[in-house]
Amino acid sequence: MYLEHCSAKSFFFFVIWRKFRIFALFTLLFGWYWKGFLGFILMER
């Protein structure tokens, strides 16, 4: 009964959380790569 009542809201929250988690992971990877790339350029100069 409780699961049926909250299925739509929990599913909506799950989809948002999944997309946000993927976006956060890409942002983290891109930020780490960009920081390493800038550090490499600054060290080469």
Image: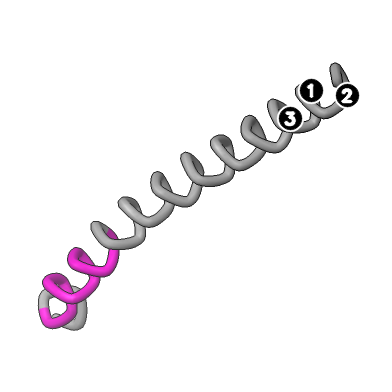
Marks 2/1: CA–CA distance: 5 Å
Residue 38 falls within the magenta-colored stretch: no
Residue 42 x/y as whole percent: 82, 28
Q: Which residues are magenta?
A: 5-14
Residue drawn at the location 47% of the way across and 40% of the way down? 26
Q: Decide if residue 36 is on the left or right side of residue 45.
A: left
Tell me what residue is drawn at x 34 percent, y 52 percent.
18
Residue sitting at 11 percent across and 75 percent down? 4
Q: Considering only vertical position in the picture, is 23 above or below 40?
A: below
> Looking at the rendered structure, which numbered label has been put on residue 40?
1
Frontmost residue, 23 versus 10: 23
Residue 45, compared with residue 17, is above or below; it is: above
Which of these two is toward me, 11 or 3? 11
Res 40 quadrant in image: top right
What is the three-letter code of the residue carrying label 3?
A: Gly
In this picture the colour scheme is one colour
The three-letter code of the residue at mark 1 reads Phe
